[in-house]
Image (cartoon, rainbow, N blue to C red):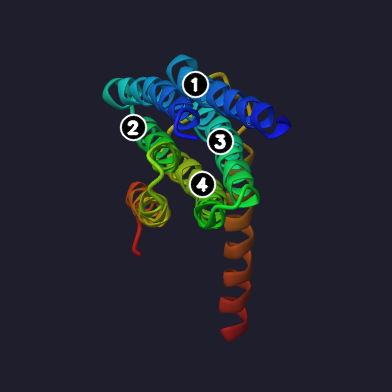
Amino acid sequence: MMEFFNEYLIVLIALLISIAMAIIRVIKGPTAPDRIVGLDTINTIVIVGMVVFGTAFNEIIYIDVAIVYALLSFISTLFIAKYLEGGDF
Amino acid sequence: MWFDYLIYILLAIGVFFNILGGFGLLRFPDVYTRLHAGTKCTTFGSIFITGSVIILGLKMWYLGSTDGSILAIHTAGALVAILLTNPTGAHAIARAAHKSGVKPVGAVVDSLQTKSLKHNVNKKIIETKKMEEEK
């Protein structure tokens, strides 16, 4: 059973390539909404990466961390968008 | 066993779409088109990767391990969190980008702008009517 889980580490490396491309967009982005789009993409891929990591090492507590991270990153994205939009809260 | 092939196929589809999302984030010319690549492709790929983990957990549960059922249920919770939060955040980002003055590249008609203009004109007409009635 243990040999099967190592396929998930290859998936994790592929997800890291996608995160690297999003980081390039965050650094390069001409306007502020470009950078927020990059950050939102990084958040989603990190959530999936946590699920894959927890599956690869058979630790279920990592998946609970992924759920909490999803909800908190959603709140942070909403607040940054509200800040860009201007006006009162 | 045919479960293994199904898990591999779902993982391949998910990884392909996630890398496609990162690649489109680099190549598209505009905030709104980048939002398409960075949100839709990533959500689609995440559904397939978490689906493969859920099927792995169901397989472990079928083979007689109690960890498998916990793995499947918690991963389904993570999938529900992704599905609820990701499109909502993308909508908020697009709205904020339009309100902060970023224009789409090559766009001719700004439908949202004309709509809000008409709305403002209608509100002003109603306000002036109210003022006249009060006089």
Three-letter residue code for mark 3 = Ile
Tags 4 and 3 touching, CB below 8 Å: no
**Residue visible at 29% across and 20% down?**
A28
Residue for point 36% across, 56% down: A72
C-alpha separation, residue under disc 1 versus residue under disc 4: 17 Å
Between the residue at mark 2 and the residue at mark 1, the CA separation in whole angstroms equals 18 Å
Q: Secondary structure at mark 3?
A: helix
Distance, label 4 to label 3, CA atoms, is 16 Å
Dot 4 amino acid type: Asn
Q: Which residue is mark 2?
A: A35
* In this picture, residue A27 sits left or right of residue B77: left
- Chain of the residue where label 3 is placed in the rendered structure: B
Nearest the viewer among A7 and B92 is A7
- Where residue B91 appears, as percent x and y from the top left, is 53, 46
Q: Nearer the viewer, mark 4 or mark 3?
A: 3
When asked about the image quadrant of residue A68, the answer is bottom left
Q: How many other residues sit within 10 Å of disc 4, few (<14), some (14-19) or many (≥20)? A: many
How many badges with numbers are in the image?
4
Secondary structure at numbered mark 1: helix
Q: Which residue is mark 4?
A: B86
Question: Label 1 belongs to which residue?
Answer: B19
Residue B49: mark: 3
Q: Where B3 falls versus B64 (above or below)?
A: above
Question: Which label lies toward us, 1 or 4?
Answer: 1
Mark 1 and mark 4 lie on one chain; the one further toward the N terminus is 1
Q: Are tags 4 and 3 found on a single chain?
A: yes
Disc number placed over residue A88 in the picture, else none: none
- Labels 4 and 3: the sequence-earlier one: 3
- Find the distance from the CA under tag 2 to the CA under tag 3: 26 Å
Quick one: which residue is furthest to the left in this view?
A27
